Image: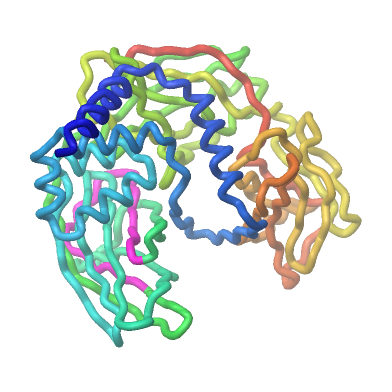
Amino acid sequence: MFEKEENELKNWKEKYENMDLPIDEIDDAIQIGFQKAKETKKVIKLNWKSRIWSIVVAAIFLFGFLASIRVSPSFADYVTKVPGMEKIVEMIRQRDDKGLLAAVENKYAQKINVSQEKNGIKVTIDSVIADEQQIVVFYTINGKGKKQNFETSLGYLKPRDGKELPEHSFSYGGYEDPHISTVEYYFNKPYKQQDFNLVLNIKNEEQTEQFSIPFSIKKHEKTNQIYELNKTVNIQGQKIKIKKVTIFPLRVAINVEMDPSNTKEILDFQDIRLVDQNAEVWSKIRNGLTAEGVSDTEKIYYLQSNYFKDPKELYLVIDKLQAIDKEDKYLVIDTEKQQILKQPKGNYLTDLKKEGDIIFLTLNTKKEFNYFMFGSIFDANGKEIESNESYGEGYENNKQRIGFNISSTQKYTNPIKIKLEYYPSYIEGKTKIRIK
């Protein structure tokens, strides 16, 4: 039974593992999928705590995942025996993270299966996947009767030893199935705590409940693989040093440093990936922490992990960067006159409008630009202006309305300047560095 389907999946798996993936074409397909999914215009409101939501997944990854389930009986048996694991695997498939899926396949997930119930809402910590610098907590929410449509309005970890966690960032949120969610922590250095409380605010249209669920994780010994490179590449006249590559079980960290003499501000590594001797690709993390700054000239970019694959040969490939001239790294506007005074080449931003506390602009691009571009804001006297919300509307007819808020209680002097963290301006090259 199912022999035909299994053979077809095996063939897909073999083709996928030996395929030289056309990254740009896949990205285009994903963008088209986003656009088709937008049946109505939707305003997205973000606050300072990022929430992780599912993305459109290229079909090739689905076939690769299904093949791994069908041709790996031990993995299939593991998935069916661990409580909640089927849902977790489905969630990982939604977020398109090969490294996280490999961690599950290699039985790196820790079973927790601890529950707490309050007023008809039951929260269960199903499993945790953790290495020395990252913790991913998977939990499910279930209600009695009509108590559904749950949302996590707050989620974080509280160490039971009372000590502060090392410097970190974290995120929380749900996926396509409203019952399944995660809380994820990303540390700049190894953490020591093993005993935590998962603190959650769970709400729906009827009620709000707070949970504090104790759980413990196993201690992880040092497992990372560090490759010191210190190699400088030149992409359209811009010098970039690839300092080191660190491979963790759950992600890969690429430390890069920009040459201070560069004429352009490098905003993002648009196309950066790991490739092995069989042309299998590990690309940027699509859901979760993708990058963080170390200094004005140094950043860390995070890729999906190939830790459990351990290829004989491994290369770092960089083809496309977001970059603007250094003198254009600030957008200058007058909110009172509702005018754009200065922006990078291309004039992609138009139609400045102030609507209450929100400053709206129209972004004009041939392809949808899925980045919130605004960073720190300063007034004409150098005073920093607080803004804790960004806005984005659906992409339609090559236009997208974006914006940020400035509370009416803040006093400032026009014009103001906004640091551009991302911008649809690119440089390209062909760079390939051997890691091992």
- Residue 102 spot, x, y in % from top left: 23, 37
Q: Residue at x 31, y 70 (%)?
A: 141
Q: Quadrant of residue 155?
A: bottom left
Span shown in magenta? 179-200
Quarter containing the C terminus: top left
- The stretch drawn in magenta includes residue 207: no
- Residue 151 spot, x, y in % from top left: 42, 70
Quarter containing the N terminus: top left
Q: Residue at x 41, y 60 (%)?
A: 173
Could you say which is closer to the camera, residue 28 or residue 323?
Answer: 28
Could you say which is closer to the camera, residue 122 or residue 288?
Answer: 122
Q: Please say if 154 is above or below 246.
A: below
Could you say which is closer to the camera, residue 383 or residue 230?
Answer: 230
In the current view of this chain or complex, which residue is farthest to the right? 337
**Residue 126 in view (yes/no):** yes
Compared across the picture, whether 354 is left or right of 436 comes to right
